[in-house]
Amino acid sequence: MSKVSFVIPCYRSARTIEGVVAEIQSTMASMPEYTCEIILVNDCSPDDTYEVIKNLCARYSCITGISLAKNFGQHAALMAGLRRSDGEIVVCLDDDGQTPANEVGKLLERIERGSDVVYASYGDKKHSAFRNFGTWMNDMMTRIMLGKPKDLHLTSYFAAKRFVVDSMLQYENSYPYIIGLVLRATRNISNVPVNHRSRTVGTSGYTMKKLLGLWFNGFTAFSILPLRIATMTGALFAGAGFLYGIYTVVKKFVNPEVPLGFSSLMAAVVFIGGMLMIMLGLIGEYIGRIYISINNSPQYVVREETHSGETDCGE
């Protein structure tokens, strides 16, 4: 009998997480070949999410509640839950009910058929236009920076084997990025189609600031390609500047009466200066993250934990 660990990061989910837990419980009750545990990680939600989690721990078996001391972000909350999990298979999903827990059997079946990691793919996503745009940008970034296959769809609803999770947990630096950790652990990743539900309560917790921070985590923590692009861009502009200098000298000799263009010179100086500032800022971002990691800044800090009486559902 295999054990499945469900890890759910929670933020502003006081009105939704109870339904998600109930759906997991009823679904797993119909799958006697598995036992399960549910790990709910409260990412310092401003509402009474953790009070609801503590009530769930009292009502149900096999639930662990974790409350973080401040808002560390979804990926740090996932890492906190993954470190508490001990199932042979780990399933991560959202707290808002949009990721259908009653279709987890599709992910588990594909895992049993040999995939190391299985992501749910949605034919018709019910996110807002802003969230869909953020998902598209994240997909482009992972393809370019991390080498994600074009036909692989990455979502927040996925299942992974234990050895993949153990590999992910070896990462102890300050900026975890779950997709990058999965892609560096294995390429035996597949998709299964599931339905995506409309949000019934609240709005997405992702803002533009959080999405930008997520993208920076992805390509600064797991790829040096941006630095290589900066180097190649610098070499390109240096070569272009050298050729333009030769062109200017030749033009002056051929036609001494032609005045040198002050406006074009200033435009070139401003443009190249801007490019240099961007490149220096990028290098500074890498150095800053290295500095923070060297100082052992934690991925997360746990304020409180709550456990139910039993550790495994179905035992």
Image (tube, rainbow, N blue to C red):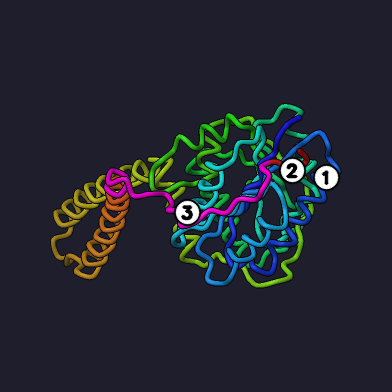
Q: Are marks 2 and 1 in contact (CB under 8 Å)?
A: yes
Q: Which label is found at residue 62?
A: none
Relative depth, front residue between 15 and 207? 15
- The residue pinned by badge 2 equals 313
Which callout, 2 or 1, points to the residue nearer the camera? 2
- The label shown at residue 215 is 3
- Rounded to the nearest whole Å, what is the CA distance between mark 2 and mark 1? 8 Å
Which region of the structure is painted magenta? 291-311
Q: Which residue is farthest top?
A: 114
At horizontal 51% and vertical 49% (from top left) the residue drawn is 141
Image spot of residue 286 (x, y percent) = 32, 48
Reading the chain from its start, which is encountered first: label 2 or label 1?
Answer: 1
Q: Position of residue 147 (x, y in %)?
A: 53, 38
**Where's residue 138, x and y in %?**
55, 53
Looking at the rendering, which quadrant does residue 116 occupy? top right
Closer to the eye: label 3 or 2: 2
Give the residue at mark 1.
29
Task: Determine whether label 3 and label 2 are within 8 Å by CB.
Answer: no
Instruction: Please tell me whether residue 305 belongs to the stretch shown in magenta.
Output: yes
SS at circle 1: helix
For marks 3 and 1, the one nearer the N-term is 1
Residue 265 falls in image quadrant: bottom left
Q: Secondary structure at mark 2?
A: loop
Check disc 1 and give the amino acid type.
Ala
Residue that lies at the very extreme toward the right in this rendered image: 30
- Which amino acid type is shown beneath numbered disc 3? Trp
